[in-house]
Image: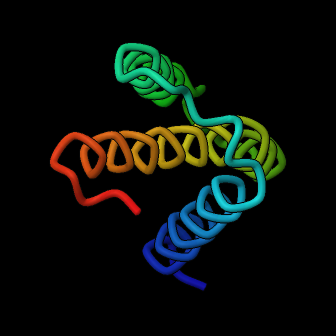
Amino acid sequence: MSNQMFVLVLAVGAAVLAAWIHARFPALAPEKMGKTALHTGIAFVLLHLTPGLGDSPVWVFAAVFLFVLPALVYALLCAIWMLKHAQTAIGMSR
């Protein structure tokens, strides 16, 4: 598997996990836009703080699945929450 294909599969998998978490645990979503913005900021700080991938294949594997994947899922979950707030704000919410 090429690096590009792995990144694509990782991103799609993170999006599916975020959508599942949102559907399975709707009470996790913050009720106010300010809290959602705070969560979004934290998520993107976590993405920037993920450790650099080293030379060892074991460390790369561990870093991707212990740091990068959870941070990416959290960031995408925050994006879902922001879209939900935007829909509510313009009156498109169900």
Number of marks in picture: 0
In the rendered structure, the answer to whether residue 46 lies left or right of residue 32 reads: right
Q: Residue furthest bottom?
A: 1
What residue is rendered at 53% in x and 72% in y? 12
Q: Quadrant location of the C terminus?
A: bottom left
In the rendered structure, the answer to whether residue 54 lies left or right of residue 35 reads: right
Q: Residue furthest left?
A: 90
In the rendered structure, the answer to whether residue 19 lies left or right of residue 31 reads: right
Give coordinates of residue 40: x percent, y percent. 42, 26
| Displayed quadrant of residue 14 | bottom right
In the rendered structure, the answer to whether residue 19 lies left or right of residue 80 reads: right
Instruction: Give the colouring mode of the picture.
Output: rainbow
Q: Quadrant location of the N terminus?
A: bottom right
Give coordinates of residue 56: x percent, y percent. 75, 44
In the displayed structure, 13 sits above or below 77; it is: below
In the displayed structure, 70 sits above or below 51; it is: below
What residue is rendered at 35% in x and 23% in y? 33
Give coordinates of residue 9: x percent, y percent. 56, 76
The residue nearer to you, when weighing 90 against 46, is 90
The residue nearer to you, when weighing 27 against 79, is 27
What residue is rendered at 65% in x and 42% in y? 55
What residue is rendered at 49% in x and 21% in y? 39
| Displayed quadrant of residue 63 | top right
